Image (cartoon, grey):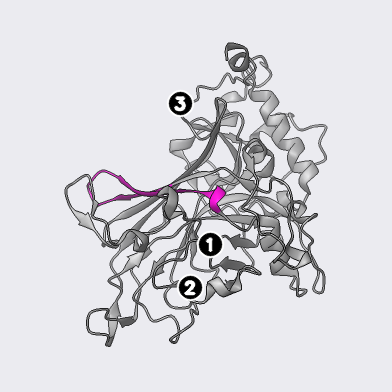
């Protein structure tokens, strides 16, 4: 064990205990502060490496990059350079942050390059063109929703979502209103949702475009995936979403979605790969997948009441997903639908009741959700902040997404 620990990468940066942003992670994001306009950074501990300042200091002189490539309000232009170039940038930063490398540690511009994370405002990481949400990517079916999805297990079921209401962590959302199902009387009413719920999910960002008429194969799928984010697919359980016998997401979901500001690359996630559950021979050839295309990501959801402490209300693991990212991408493009850099594709819930893995409050409705302040919840109340956390941990190595934190405001 001592030899194994000695082999772990170490950094000269002070990284807090159990930080998501270790030297093994180095996720990409967009930030700004009082001194800086929006720009691209990489997280390490409680610091952000300002890549534009790093470039200005000459640390990328041998990598072909435009002078303003890191002075962008989204990751899209950097992603467009291709995975090989992005990997060179990330690898260079990792080398500079190693404990035995003093090039950046002792550089005169270090104070300009290393920005305090607490001083920064994190922004939307990508300019999202299209958004696809898949309804169900685990064997578990949410109570009272996604009815009929089980019949579609020969392929993933999804729908096109609303892009303009996707917000990054820290941006509050409003309680939606609409036509409601009164579960006690069976009558329909109009008003503010009383059953506002979260859905603890993962999404991925498309890293390579296709043309209309082209399809992406399972084998090539990861070449089209830049990285993963945590995703809160807010849902109003009582807003009428479709007719009897089917589920058609619309007003119950399109009012808001929240995502994490830091994007974890597949390079960072490689150590945490797992094989997904077997499908047997029931899948069509274009969806048949082999190997370790899933990831062991621990996911947690917390509720923090206004002026109160946070309480974990459920947890799950992304390894429960019965579909992997290349399969979702293959399904998205099989009919010739094109994808573009920055498109967002979200997995469905990945719950597993046999392991007490749940992804939303509706799954816990038979349980008493007691918060730290002594109050209880069946659904989200005004003033509550919902916090998602996600991380991987193995053999002394930890990486994570940070948080998706969103407060709910009363409807306008």
Q: Secondary structure at mark 2?
A: loop
Cα–Cα span, label 3 and label 2: 41 Å
Q: Which residue is mark 1?
A: 348
Residue 254 spot, x, y in % from top left: 47, 73
Q: Earlier in the sequence, mark 1 or mark 2?
A: 2
**341 left or right, relative to 319:** right
Q: Secondary structure at mark 3?
A: loop
Asked if residue 52 can be seen in this view, the reply is no
Mark 2, other Cα within 10 Å: few <14 / some 14–19 / many ≥20: some
Q: Nearer the viewer, mark 1 or mark 3?
A: 1
Region rendered in magenta: 300-320
Mark 1 and mark 2 in contact? Answer it, CB < 8 Å. Answer: yes
Residue 209 spot, x, y in % from top left: 76, 62
Cα–Cα span, label 1 and label 3: 32 Å
Does 316 appear in magenta? yes
In terms of image quadrants, where is residue 280? Answer: bottom right
**Rendered residue at 70%/36% (across/down):** 90
**Rendered residue at 83%/40% (across/down):** 64
Residue 377 spot, x, y in % from top left: 24, 58
Foreground of the two, 64 or 163: 163
Mark 1, other Cα within 10 Å: few <14 / some 14–19 / many ≥20: many
Q: Secondary structure at mark 1?
A: loop
**Rendered residue at 28%/56% (across/down):** 384
Q: Which residue is mark 3?
A: 16
- Give the quarter of the figure containing the N terminus: top right
Q: Nearer the viewer, mark 3 or mark 2?
A: 2
**280 left or right, relative to 365:** right
Asked if residue 263 can be seen in this view, the reply is yes
Residue 325 spot, x, y in % from top left: 66, 56
Q: Which residue is mark 2?
A: 146
Mark 3 and mark 2 in contact? Answer it, CB < 8 Å. Answer: no
């Amino acid at each position: 064990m001592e030899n194994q620990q000695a082999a772990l990468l170490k950094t000269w940066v002070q990284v807090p205990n159990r930080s998501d942003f270790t030297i093994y992670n180095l996720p990409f994001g967009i930030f700004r502060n009082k001194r800086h306009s929006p720009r691209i950074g990489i997280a390490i501990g409680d610091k952000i490496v300002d890549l534009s300042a790093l470039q200005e200091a000459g640390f990328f002189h041998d990598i072909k990059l435009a002078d303003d490539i890191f002075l962008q309000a989204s990751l899209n232009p950097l992603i467009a350079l291709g995975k090989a170039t992005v990997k060179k940038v990330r690898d260079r930063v990792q080398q500079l942050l190693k404990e035995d490398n003093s090039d950046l540690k002792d550089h005169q511009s270090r104070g300009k390059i290393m920005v305090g994370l607490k001083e920064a405002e994190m922004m939307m990481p990508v300019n999202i063109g299209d958004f696809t949400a898949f309804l169900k990517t685990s064997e578990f079916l949410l109570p009272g929703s996604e009815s009929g999805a089980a019949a579609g297990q020969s392929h993933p079921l999804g729908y096109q979502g609303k892009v303009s209401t996707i917000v990054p962590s820290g941006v509050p959302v409003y309680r939606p209103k609409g036509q409601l199902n009164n579960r006690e009387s069976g009558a329909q009413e109009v008003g503010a949702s009383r059953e506002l719920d979260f859905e603890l999910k993962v999404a991925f960002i498309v890293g390579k475009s296709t043309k209309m008429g082209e399809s992406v194969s399972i084998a090539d799928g990861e070449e089209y995936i830049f990285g993963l984010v945590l995703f809160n697919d807010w849902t109003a359980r009582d807003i009428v979403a479709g007719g009897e016998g089917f589920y058609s997401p619309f007003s119950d979901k399109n009012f808001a979605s929240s995502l994490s500001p830091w994007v974890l690359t597949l390079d960072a996630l490689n150590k945490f790969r797992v094989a997904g559950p077997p499908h047997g021979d029931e899948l069509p050839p274009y969806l048949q997948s082999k190997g370790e295309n899933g990831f062991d990501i621990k996911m947690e959801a917390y509720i923090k009441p206004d002026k109160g402490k946070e309480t974990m209300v459920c947890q799950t693991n992304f390894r429960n997903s019965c579909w992997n990212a290349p399969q979702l991408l293959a399904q998205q493009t099989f009919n010739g639908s094109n994808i573009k850099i920055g498109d967002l594709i979200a997995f469905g819930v990945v719950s597993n009741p046999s392991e007490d893995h749940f992804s939303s409050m509706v799954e816990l409705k038979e349980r008493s959700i007691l918060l730290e302040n002594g109050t209880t919840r069946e659904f989200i109340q005004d003033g509550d902040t919902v916090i998602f956390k996600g991380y991987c941990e193995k053999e002394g190595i930890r990486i994570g997404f940070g948080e998706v934190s969103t407060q709910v405001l009363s409807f306008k």
